[in-house]
Image (cartoon, rainbow, N blue to C red):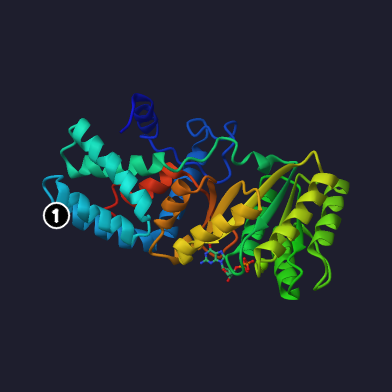
Amino acid sequence: MYDSEYLKKLSEIDSIVEKPYLSNDPEEAKPEEHPAEEEASSGVFAKLKAGLSKTRKNLVYGLDTVFGAYADLNDEFFEDLEEQLIMADVGVHTTEEVLDELRSMVKDERIRSTGDCRAALARLVASRMSVPEDAYSFEKGPSVVLVIGVNGVGKTTYCGKLASALKKQGRKVIMAAADTFRAAATEQLIMWGDRAGVDVISGQEGSDPASVIYDALHAARARHADILICDTAGRLNNKKNLMNELDKIDRIISRELPDYKRENLIVLDATTGQNAMSQARDFAEVSDITGIVLTKMDGTAKGGIAIAIASELSVPVKFIGVGEGVDDILRFDPASFAQAMFEGVSDEQI
Ligand SMILES: Nc1nc2c(ncn2[C@@H]2O[C@H](COP(=O)(O)OP(=O)(O)O)[C@@H](O)[C@H]2O)c(=O)[nH]1
Ligand SMILES: [Mg+2]
């Protein structure tokens, strides 16, 4: 079921490294030399736990009940565990695979205690949700970030949060208000831009989104921007229209800024559960998605959907939204996430 390479990977993630949002850069992230970084790091983990509190209440309670009820790790125990994971929206497929691996591990490693079993479960889950090392290289720029997804999932909010975080890192950021469908959408982005101190390129209500992007690409070049973040409209009345629009935008970006890195992020609302998964699949058919932003994790008790999404889609989850505030955005760190969901939480106040 698993080989030595796999076990090595598991043992490597055993020691959970908490990465603050702003220190993904190995140059910056040396906690032993920077006590302030360490503090920021535990602050980020606390924020993650707080953001996941609804899910934690649900899942931790369920897990405590299962792990507390069995002295033996027998079939019934695994059945109860399966039920808990499915109830937290981890997904039938992922749950089955994880539990198969857990069963083999319990047998092969002679795991007896429920505590060890729980820790093994957290490690198994983390190992299924990898984020590639270069996942955030676009943040250094020069890059164009296209933010897509259906209405109401949190695209504009994410653009604002990302712009603010990157600005704080000293990057030169510009945003494009390419949701020209409603004037309010442009106003919303301009408000985020004002707060973050970031310029927003916009057009008239009803104008062609591609023309706004065109203007923004030129502004990005002329003003030497590191990152251009493009907000888009979420109306997905049919796949063909969406494909045409995204194709057109894609061609313009490639033509006007061929030397800029491209990042296509799909925003999914965690509170919509398995629906979010099917939206990701739909968009993947019409666009070359490079990452997922999973929003509103704070608003769901079924945050296990992040595990299903991160392990079943071939695109990494890169960010999670944990609130409406400007700082309520975190890089998705699988090990911290799994720890927050599964491990050593039973005695804590949550
Ligand atoms: N609780 C919570 N609300 C969020 C989060 N992200 C976005 N929202 C809210 O979701 C609503 C829709 O967001 P918006 O950015 O306008 O979505 P868009 O239509 O995709 O651009 C707004 O009320 C946001 O404040 C999040 O991570 N947590
Ligand atoms: Mg919007």
User: Which picture quadrant has residue 299?
Assistant: bottom left
6, 227: nearer the viewer: 6
Q: Position of residue 103 (x, y in %)?
A: 23, 40
User: Which picture quadrant has residue 231?
Assistant: bottom right
Q: Is residue 102 left or right of residue 229?
A: left
The quadrant where ligand 2 appears is: bottom right
Q: Residue at x 32, y 31 (%)?
A: 2
Q: Residue at x 57, y 63 (%)?
A: 325
302, 299: nearer the viewer: 302
> Residue lying furthest top in this view?
4
325, 271: nearer the viewer: 271
Q: Residue at x 63, y 62 (%)?
A: 155
Q: At numbered mark 1, what does the secondary structure look like: helix, strand or loop? A: helix
Asked if residue 40 is positioned above or below residue 237 in the image, the reply reads: above
Residue 273 in sight here? yes
Callout 1, which amino acid? Answer: Ala
Marker count (numbered): 1
Q: Is residue 168 left or right of residue 64?
A: right
User: Which picture quadrant has residue 108?
Assistant: top left
Which quadrant of the figure contains the N terminus? top left
Q: Position of residue 209 (x, y in %)?
A: 79, 63
> Residue lying furthest front in this view?
240
State the residue position of label 1. Answer: 69
